[in-house]
Amino acid sequence: MFNKLIGNNHIKETLRRMLATDRVPHSLLFAGVEGIGKKQFALELAKSFVCQNPKNFEACDICAACKRADKFTFPKPDDKDAHKEVIFSEHADIGLVIPYNKNILIDAVRNLEKEANFRPFEAKARFLLIDEAEKLNTAKDNAANALLKTLEEPPPTSYIFLITSRPDALLPTILSRCQTLRFAPIAPTEIENYLLETKKFSPDDAAILARLSRGSIGHALSMDLSRFPAQRDVMSKVLESLLIKQNRTTLLRTAEEMNDAKNKDSYNASLEILETLIHDIWKLTLGNSEENIVNADIKNNLKKLAENADSKRLASWLTEIETMRENFNVNLNKKIATDALFMQMANGF
């Protein structure tokens, strides 16, 4: 049932209309930020077809087919051969293609094409999902091109759903063959309520995770609050060095610490915290209400930084950080990139 999913009520209503009118496209693109629940929506739509006792065209979540539909056993990350095939759930008509390292293998796409031409084993249709579809290789004779014919002329009993956080990275020819569902970030209040309902978070922790989530329930659930204060303190010192002390030595030392082997797993989190701090300072320079900032508990420190900040430069910093993130997709050296980022941010001071 779609009601169990968080946020994006407009998508729920769109899918319900498609089901009620029997007009679900055979090629659908689920697009939105990471961790927003796109794959869960795609699986829920598939379950509506395989369900043995649908209610108002939606899955009942009770029958044996529903219980098997979204249970997957995934291969080990280093098992390349296993990533060359569609990974089926415990239901034989719902399969998933996932990337191996940073690419979806062409063998996996060819296997998907083959599976799409088989008639359903149990249900009235087969559903083949491609997760992180932006990782379809776009070189000549690659996975992306191999998919085009199947998307253009899918078998009548097969549906192909692409799931991506970066639709701009897909070939235009793929985009033109899919109807796109665009997911919006989830409201912080909805995320906070969900976290409280799980009974795994205190009200204070749920509130701060919701503010830091950037509209992504997956991001909220993956954050390590025990490390957050120390990480934020380090990133605050970066901004202090940029806006007040103009200390490039501190910037380079911080870049080195961020890329130390012991901090490898926290690098992305530190970068995201830096972005939230810049966003908050930017809002303060524009005169936004203090209630709208994420890091409200350190608003006095942020006000001091905002007094020395320029909104245009802050906006350019955010652009530079996002550009660096995109460049990581082509194996950019993080240490060199972080040094360059901080020096670029320091320019003009």
Image (cartoon, grey):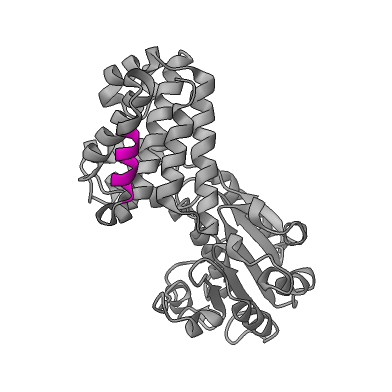
Lateral position of residue 84 relative to residue 308, left or right:
right
Lateral position of residue 339 relative to residue 132, left or right:
left
- Magenta run includes residue 142: no
Residue 329, given in percent of the width and then of the height, sits at: 53, 56
Please name the residue shown 52% across and 27% down the image: 315
In the image, residue 245 above or below residue 232: above
Q: Nearer the viewer, residue 321 or 210?
A: 321
Q: Is residue 160 visible?
A: yes
Instruction: Specify the segment rendered in magenta.
Output: 250-259
Please name the residue shown 62% across and 63% down the image: 162
Residue 53, given in percent of the width and then of the height, sits at: 52, 72
In the image, residue 110 above or below residue 134: below
Quadrant placement of the C terminus: top left
Residue 210, given in percent of the width and then of the height, sits at: 35, 39
> Exactly how many numbered labels are in the figure?
0
Q: Nearer the viewer, residue 323 or 136?
A: 323
In the image, residue 71 above or below residue 198: below
Tell me the chief SS of the magenta region.
helix
Residue 31, given in percent of the width and then of the height, sits at: 60, 52
Lateral position of residue 223 relative to residue 187, left or right:
left
Q: Is residue 57 visible?
A: no
- Magenta run includes residue 256: yes
Please name the residue shown 26% across and 49% down the image: 224
Please name the residue shown 49% across and 21% down the image: 348
